[in-house]
Amino acid sequence: MNKIKLRRYLKPYWLFALLSPLLMIGEVLIDLQQPKLMSKIVNQGVLGGDFSVILSTGIQMLILVAIGGVMGSLCAYTASVASQGFGNDLRVDAFNRVMKLSLQQTDQFTTGSLVTRLTNDITSMQELVQMILRMFVRAPIHLLGGLYMCLSLNIKFGYVMLISLPLQALIVILLVVKANPLYAKVQTKIDRVNSVVHENVSGSRVVKAYICEDYENERFDGANKDFRKTNLKVLELTSAIMPLLMIVMNVSVIAIIYIGGWQVQAQAMNVGDVMAATQYITQALMSVMMVSMIFQQIARGRACAERIREMLAADPAVVSGKVTEGTETGTVEFRGVSFKYPGSAGDNVLNNVSVSVKRGETLAIIGATGSGKSTLVSMIPRFYDAICGDVFVDGVNVRDWDLHALRQRISFVLQKSELFSGTVKENIRWGKDDATDEEIEFAARVAQADEFIRTIPNGYDGWIAAKGTSLSGGQKQRMAIARAVVRKPEIIIFDDSTSALDLATEAKLQAALRENLGDTTVIKIAQRIASVMHADRIAVIENGTIAACDTHENLMKTCETYRDIYASQIKDGGDSK
């Protein structure tokens, strides 16, 4: 996998990324002056009895604290601007990449995993950037500065540091080694939780219809407990490190006081210097604690970064060509097309399929469930590519088409009608963003949707709930058809998208399509013979191949499979003409 450098997303904010550490350095240098000034107050002011030293030094400390506070605030602001910008740009790029992935790639990632990567993982990286710009600078300077200032007071304090610092470093290293693999597992567990949530929110009606709330609650509880169990392992490690580091720090402070006490008795040091030394050693060892927090965040960030890189490095399986104009208009042709879903261990879904559709012709496709009907038409707008053979649109191989130009010519009405929260007008205009009100109403009339739309409060300006839950199945299908019609495409594909319509409404729809979009090529998948028998030609798919393709009358004479379907639906009363 090509190693994508995520730090490039910080380049547009280089000025803020540079100012933040510089401001932090200034704040830390001011902090390092405070114990020294306090020592002066104790030695010269309190013990020396000079109140003017206490007053002047106290004012100096207050001024420095104010300057340090301003620098700290500016550091927080600049780090936030840089990290938020980093997160925003990375999330936009990642989302754009997801939009370019083929259907098979999004299936491989899973919806829950993609949601986690776009939200939780990128947020973790954003927090890591902010921490690096602030704490990653603050901790080392505080550590080195505190050590230097402490040793400058008395070199014998170095014995304490020679023991305490390696001990703290060992504790931090052990934590990172133990926690690092767990962070990757935590993110995977979040994927699972998000997947279960997504499935149940989008499929809530099915869950309720089959009274499976308890089962789904248990499934979510299982995924959530699995996440909690893994997360607790990480928290156990991180919660253990702080007490251990605090013990080392407090023992070190006691050692400094003990050594300093002997030095005071020997008149080699002043009391104020011992107080300053304890503050400096505290600052230095607290910095080690900060470093441990940074390494924890880095460990988690590295796991998140790998997942984000994997998503960004996923080159679209369907690559756009360059052709923007065809040699014909409204034609579709399959030449020896075979297809098998990636990773599938079974046989091909389609085998050596060859069929062509002329401009303005209506081709119906019928066959048993799982025979490959939807897969076949999904190759026209290149949702999938054939593993063998070629698909042509307007006389050009679909692999050579610019994807935008290709899909601009095609309207696809899916088996499952996808509507969005918004007005009726917005949902139809989604098919053509510059459609006028007249075009929208025209498309609704053709789709046989105008009548029920006008019964909705506020009509075309009426609100539609997410997923169209406020509409019936037939109403949703007609809305989706109107969205396809408003584009006035060269080719329109119905993937069993009239199944919820009664035969009378469907007949009106077909008549309106022929009358208003006579030059549009129609490819229609259906389960009902009554829905397709008036098509120009009907392709019968059986076991991934086209068993026959002809008019209804000729198929009744020559195709046994078609006659069986007809007999089961029409003759035996399954449907009526």
Image (cartoon, rainbow, N blue to C red):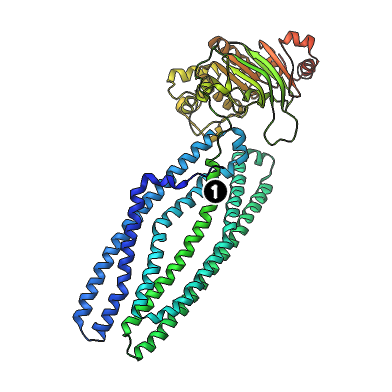
Give how far across and how far down residue 336 sits, in percent.
Answer: 69, 19
Q: Split into 4 quadrants, where in the image is the C terminus? A: top right
Quarter of the rendering containing residue 138:
bottom left
Q: What residue type is labelled 1?
A: Glu
Q: In this view, does 98 lie to the left or right of 59?
A: right
Give how far across and how far down residue 182 sits, in percent.
Answer: 59, 57
Q: Is residue 412 left or right of residue 42?
A: right
Does residue 531 show up?
A: no
Identify whether 322 is placed above or below 2.
above
Residue topped by disc 1: 306
Identify whether 212 is placed above or below 185.
above
Query: Image point 32% across, 68% down: which residue?
Result: 31
Identify whether 47 is placed above or below 326.
below
Describe the element under mark 1 as helix, strand or loop: helix
Give how far across and how far down residue 229 sits, in percent.
Answer: 62, 59
Query: Image point 20% across, 82% down: which residue?
Result: 51
Quarter of the rendering containing residue 566:
top right
Give how far across and how far down residue 251 sits, in percent.
Answer: 47, 80
Query: Image point 21% across, 77% down: which residue?
Result: 55
